[in-house]
Image (tube, rainbow, N blue to C red):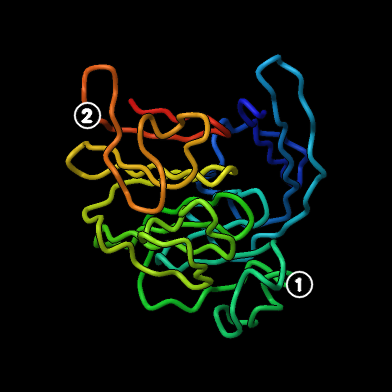
């Protein structure tokens, strides 16, 4: 399995910048190239195809997923591109569902502003609004990665009612999600095949445990292909 990824952005002057996270901040206007390298636990690596994209809107944050990408502009509006026509319902972006594949970035039609986001496998993505509410969507909710207590698909962002005051979220390419609350606790839901969510998993968010009990006083989280991290 995949141990970790490295992300690379090449700007119009051919300057290449490496990122250890798929959350990329503060890119300026212009044309870019993006690729990633996947490493397994043995140290073997595989490079992805290069994706060309142009930023004509000022984004404050970009997150790169397995099959699609999300970005937030300076006003908190959400944009999306990549993926396929099956991942969005008509009218969810300015271009409709076809715009998700053929145009981009396309502004998503949601009535709340976003402060954080994370993208996982295929259409699985999550966003946090300015009030700390968490929303999820997925067109293949097999492991319960929507976190709403069911395995039904939701193509539009739907609030996870059981979690409030959310500070950060991290989703993996293998349908696992961990969430950091403002009180320093960490919660998880979705796939737990390799204990990447410690002792929990499934469709309902549950608090994660460490060797000394429930995780607390945490300030940073991240999730890998089959791993989870909290600091």
Q: Name the residue: 61% across, 84% down.
A: 90
Spot occupied by residue 137 in the image (x, y as percentages of width and height): 49, 64
How many numbered discs, if any?
Answer: 2
Tag 2, which secondary structure?
strand
Crowd tier of the residue under label 1, counting other residues whose Cα lies within 10 Å: few below 14, some 14–19, many 20 or above? some
User: In front here: 83 or 160?
Assistant: 160
User: In front here: 153 or 34?
Assistant: 153
Q: Is residue 33 left or right of residue 137?
A: right
Tag 1, which secondary structure?
helix
Q: Which mark is residue 214?
A: 2
Crowd tier of the residue under label 2, counting other residues whose Cα lies within 10 Å: few below 14, some 14–19, many 20 or above? few
Residue lying furthest bottom in this view?
91
Which quadrant would the N terminus be assigned to in this image? Answer: top right
Q: Is residue 184 left or right of residue 77?
A: left
Within the image, what quadrant is residue 150 found in?
A: bottom left
Q: Name the residue: 33% across, 59% down.
A: 134
> Which one is in front in this view, the residue at disc 2 or the one at disc 1?
2
Residue 49 versus residue 204 in the image, above or below: above
**Mark 1 lies on residue:** 102
Residue lying furthest right in this view?
49
Residue 146 versus residue 159 in the image, above or below: above
Q: Which mark is residue 28?
A: none
Which quadrant would the C terminus be assigned to in this image? Answer: top left
Q: Name the residue: 32% across, 62% down.
A: 160
Within the image, what quadrant is residue 83 found in?
A: bottom right
Q: In the rendered structure, which disc, 2 or 1, sits on the residue that comes first in sequence?
A: 1
Spot occupied by residue 35 in the image (x, y as percentages of width and height): 74, 41
Spot occupied by residue 122 in the image (x, y as percentages of width and height): 64, 56
Question: How far separated are the C-alphas under marks 2 and 1?
Answer: 45 Å
User: In front here: 28 or 171?
Assistant: 171
Spot occupied by residue 124 in the image (x, y as percentages of width and height): 55, 57
């Amino acid at each position: 399995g995949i141990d970790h990824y490295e992300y690379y952005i090449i700007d119009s002057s051919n300057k290449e910048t490496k990122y250890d996270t798929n959350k990329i901040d503060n890119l300026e206007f212009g044309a870019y190239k993006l690729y990633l390298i996947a490493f397994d636990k043995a140290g073997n690596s595989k490079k992805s195809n290069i994706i060309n994209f142009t930023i004509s809107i000022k984004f404050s944050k970009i997150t790169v997923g397995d099959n699609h990408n999300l970005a937030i502009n300076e006003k908190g509006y959400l944009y999306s591109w990549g993926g396929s026509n099956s991942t969005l319902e008509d009218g969810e972006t300015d271009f409709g569902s076809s715009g998700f594949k053929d145009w981009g970035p396309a502004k998503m039609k949601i009535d709340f502003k976003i402060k954080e986001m994370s993208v996982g496998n295929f259409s699985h993505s999550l966003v946090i609004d300015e009030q700390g509410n968490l929303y999820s969507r997925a067109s293949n909710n097999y492991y319960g990665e929507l976190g709403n207590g069911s395995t039904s698909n939701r193509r539009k962002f739907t609030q996870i009612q059981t979690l409030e005051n959310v500070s950060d979220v991290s989703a993996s390419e293998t349908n696992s999600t961990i969430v950091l609350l403002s009180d320093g606790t960490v919660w998880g839901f979705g796939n737990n095949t390799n204990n990447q969510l410690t002792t929990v998993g499934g469709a309902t968010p549950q608090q994660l445990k460490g060797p000394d009990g429930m995780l607390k006083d945490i300030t940073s989280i991240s999730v890998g292909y089959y791993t989870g991290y909290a600091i």
